[in-house]
C-alpha cells in the first residue's frame, strides 16, 4: 500500500469467515457522534458533548456535519483539528 493510498477499514462477516468482508470503508468515511468525538479528542479526559455544542455555536473547534439533524464528526476532521493545536518545542 502506497503512502497516498487510502487505508481501508473492513468489517468481516464473523459468522461466516470464509466469505469476503461485508463492507469496507476508507478512513474518510468514518464518522463519530459527539460522545465518541469527545473521547477521541480528549482521551482519558473526554470533551463533553455540551462543550462540543458550545464550540459549534461559537464556530470554533473541529468541523462537523449534520445529516438529517444529527451531529457527526469525520475522523479526518478531528485529526486535522488536533494537528492544528499542536505546539512544537
Image (cartoon, rainbow, N blue to C red):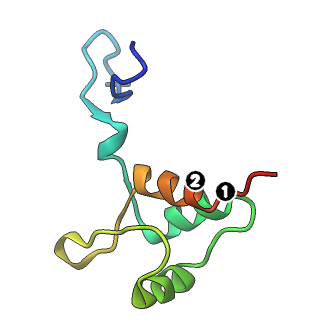
In the rendering, which numbered label is found on residue 37?
A: none
> Looking at this view, is 40 or 2 the one in front?
2
In which quadrant is the N terminus drawn?
top left
Residue depicted at 53% across the width and 86% down the height: 50
Specify few, some or many for label 1: CA neighbours under 10 Å numbering under 14, 14-19, or 20 or more.
few
In this view, 58 is above or below 66? below
Q: Secondary structure at mark 2?
A: helix
Q: Is residue 12 left or right of residue 45?
A: left
Residue corresponding to mark 2 = 83
C-alpha distance separating marks 2 and 1? 5 Å
> Looking at this view, is 48 or 75 the one in front?
75
Corner quadrant of residue 82: bottom right
Query: Do the residues under discs 2 and 1 have CB atoms within 8 angstroms?
Result: yes
- Outermost residue, right direction? 89
Residue 4: x percent and y percent? Answer: 36, 24
Q: Is residue 5 left or right of residue 50?
A: left
Residue depicted at 38% across the width and 25% down the height: 14
In this view, 48 is above or below 89? below
In this view, 53 is above or below 82? below
> Looking at this view, is 45 or 2 the one in front?
2
In this view, 2 is above or below 26? above
Residue 58: x percent and y percent? Answer: 44, 90
Residue 34: x percent and y percent? Answer: 46, 71
Residue corresponding to mark 1 = 86
Q: Is residue 54 left or right of residue 20?
A: right
- Outermost residue, front direction? 89
Residue 85: x percent and y percent? Answer: 62, 62
Residue depicted at 56% across the width and 84% down the height: 51
Amino acid at each position: 500500500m502506497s503512502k497516498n493510498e487510502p487505508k481501508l477499514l473492513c468489517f468481516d462477516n464473523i459468522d461466516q469467515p470464509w466469505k469476503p468482508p461485508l463492507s469496507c470503508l476508507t478512513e474518510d468515511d468514518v464518522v463519530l457522534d459527539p460522545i465518541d468525538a469527545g473521547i477521541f479528542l480528549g482521551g482519558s479526559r473526554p470533551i463533553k458533548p455540551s462543550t462540543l455544542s458550545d464550540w459549534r455555536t461559537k464556530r470554533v473547534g473541529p468541523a462537523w456535519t449534520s445529516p438529517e439533524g444529527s451531529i457527526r464528526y469525520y475522523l479526518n476532521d478531528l485529526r486535522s483539528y488536533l494537528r492544528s493545536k499542536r505546539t512544537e518545542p
